[in-house]
Amino acid sequence: TCHRPHGGSDGGMLRQVEGGVCLSCHDSGAGAMSAAHDGIPLNGDRCTECHASHGQADQHASLRLAAHPTTRDGNCNACHEEASTALKAGDAGSTCRSCHESVPGEDLANTHMGVGEDMCLECHNPHAGPAAPVLRDVPRVTCTECHTDLSELRAGHAPVLAGQCLDCHSGHGSDEESLLVAAPGRELCETCHEDKAAAIDEAEVPHAPAEMCDTCHDGHGTGIARLLKARQDQLCAECHQELIDEISIGTPHAPVAMGACSSCHDPHGSEHEKLLLQKGGDNCLSCHKNHVPDAIGEVKHEPVEWKLCLSCHDPHSSRHGSLLKAPAEEVCLGCHASAMRDLEAAEVAHRPVAEGQCLQCHLPHGGTNLAMLRRPPQQVCLTCHQDIHDEASRQDTVHAPVTRGDCLKCHEGHQSNLPHLERKAPPELCADCHPLTTSLFREKHLGLAGTDMDCLSCHDKHGGKGRGMLLPEVHVPFNNGDCSQCHDLEEEK
């Protein structure tokens, strides 16, 4: 009836110009039509200024949602000369002032442009409109006719995207800047964000800028999440420049590199120091779940078990691997200073220990092996000493601790006063497993006590010839069991 089904030359695919469409059904000269419009001549040009073209169920005669009272009552003569479109007061501003002698807000510190000049029709329709208070169009359209910078905003504050400009701004005047309905910052924002305001009040560690929302947030939107004025790290740097300088000289933590400060910190307030989202290590473990104590293994490093991640790591940036606060050796010695004292007092140091390569043998967080070793002791030792194991394996008999991989049965892991990091000097070391007083020992050693013997002068400590693990080159009298050629056995007994 009104539209062409396939297309047309007029807007909305109308069959003819707007007025012609309306008057094709509604006779402007009919008595009812004329009476409803106080006899004002109608040509159909401005029908949709007052009437919704498709209907509005809650308004008589399909009047638009927001109708001026005179329009709603059909009292055209309140503003117009009788049976004429001419205004009684001569111009629109004066006509409006004949009823609206004072406009709310016009006496305040800041007024909307045009209010003092009675430019009412720049924003308002004199008869009816799609939004209160009788606006020419919905606020988003009406306001952006002047505020064009907001017309293309795609990611912004919910009221802005919904076109609810008047939720925050006064249309006529305000004592606040930008015609805000309340003081900028918390007073204005908490009218909607009551939960956030309550959380700030309850926080044991409040963030000072949280009272001034517009320090970080833009009321309309910037295209950045949470209405932020800039990337999080750039905003934080305005107060925390020392952290930015520190980060720039090292390798940053991934959230820091992404500028995601709120991954760890609550920007408004927190129950924990430094505005952390969770207490200490719990904050770290929310991402680093593979280091949760239950996932580490049976043997746990105490700082891990107690969630003291920051005792070893810097949360922002580091010039050392794994965000360590210092080189691994220095970090370890922060708690294990006694190990360095023992090392300095010893005559022989294990090379990785002397070079500060603690993590060459040990895991920093824990694991399944004794002393947090990376692997079982033999496997750790064999990463450097494979040649010793291979040589022993080629012998007739391999020493039982070597077979079991129990290197630490005889050797110290860090330091010793003996040449090969032995725990004790023979024969005391050997006597831990091979008692020197048994009849079998006496029988094998021609009745000698053995307490002053050098076991390694005859036996190989890892593996050797025959059941006795003898050294490969044996003195002929010894090989024949004829010690008397050289020794006075009676005297030695």
Image: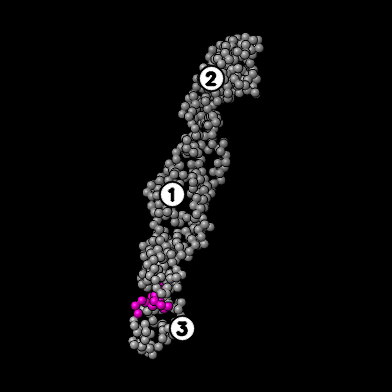
Q: Quadrant of the C terminus?
A: bottom left
- Nearest to the observer: residue 274 or residue 453: 453
Q: Amino acid at mark 1?
A: His
**SS label for mark 2:** loop
Q: Which residue is mark 1?
A: 253
Cβ atoms under marks 3 and 1 closer than 8 Å: no
Q: Amino acid at mark 3?
A: Leu
Q: Which residues are magenta?
A: 460-474
Write the residue at 39% across / 61% down.
357
Q: Which residue is mark 2?
A: 7
Considering only order in the chain, which callout, 1 or 3, is on the residue closer to the N terminus?
A: 1
Considering only order in the chain, which callout, 2 or 1, is on the residue closer to the N terminus?
A: 2
Which-is-in-front pick, marks 1 and 2? 2
Considering only order in the chain, which callout, 3 or 2, is on the residue closer to the N terminus?
A: 2
Disc 2 to disc 3, C-alpha distance: 115 Å
How many neighbours does mark 2 have within 10 angstroms: few (below 14), some (14-19), or many (20 or more)? few
Q: Amino acid at mark 2?
A: Gly
**SS label for mark 3:** helix
Cβ atoms under marks 1 and 2 closer than 8 Å: no
Q: Quadrant of the N terminus?
A: top right
How many neighbours does mark 1 have within 10 angstroms: few (below 14), some (14-19), or many (20 or more)? some
Write the residue at 53% across / 49% down.
271
Magenta-drawn stretch contains 465? yes
**SS label for mark 1:** loop
Say whether residue 229 is visible.
yes
